[in-house]
Amino acid sequence: MKVNQFNLGKEWLEKKKSLAELQAEFDELDAKLKEFMFSTGLKTIEVDKNVIELQVNARRSFDATALKDMISASVFNKITKPTVDTALIDAAVKLGTIKPDVVEQVTKKTEYKQLRVK
């Protein structure tokens, strides 16, 4: 069976647009339902043997600078992770601060497929 690239591409674009519209509608409805349940104190809603449950969670973030001054250096090193900022390492290579071959030795690349609309 021969694949018609134009039709396949056209169908992909149509579905992508539909998905974006549906996602926007869902996001709006999701926000309304969360606010309704939260403001009324409702914890669950049962619909067709499915239970929608409102959970109120909290994300934690830490002030590493303040923490570093409050605990020992060894403990701080044990509970933090160094990371490399891609934009900053690229800038350092461009400025000549780091040699490109050094970056090549420590870089792991993972390929992935992606479609973009231009």
Image: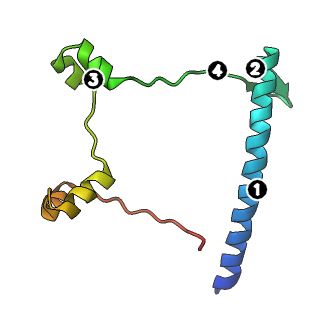
The amino acid on which the numbered mark 1 sits, given as a three-letter code, is Glu
Q: Which mark is residue 21?
A: 1
Q: Which quadrant would the N terminus be assigned to in this image?
A: bottom right
Expressed as whole percent of the image width and height from the top left, the position of residue 3 reads 64, 83
Q: Mark 3 and mark 4: span between their CA atoms?
A: 27 Å
Query: Viewer-proximal residue, 39 or 13?
Result: 39
The amino acid on which the numbered mark 2 sits, given as a three-letter code, is Phe
**Callout 2: 10 Å neighbours few (<14), some, many (20+)?**
some
**Callout 3: 10 Å neighbours few (<14), some, many (20+)?**
few
Q: Mark 3 and mark 2: span between their CA atoms?
A: 35 Å
Relative to 54, say whether 25 is above or below. below
Check disc 4 and report the residue beneath it. 56
Viewer can see residue 51? no
Which element is circle 4 on?
loop
Check disc 2 and report the residue beneath it. 38
Check disc 3 and report the residue beneath it. 79
Q: Mark 4 and mark 1: span between their CA atoms?
A: 27 Å
Q: Which mark is residue 6?
A: none
Residue at coordinates 69% horizontally, 70% vertically from top-left?
13
Q: Residue furthest front?
A: 95
Query: Viewer-proximal residue, 4 or 95?
Result: 95
Dot 4 and dot 2 residues touching (CB under 8 Å): yes
Mark 3 and mark 1 lie on one chain; the one further toward the N terminus is 1
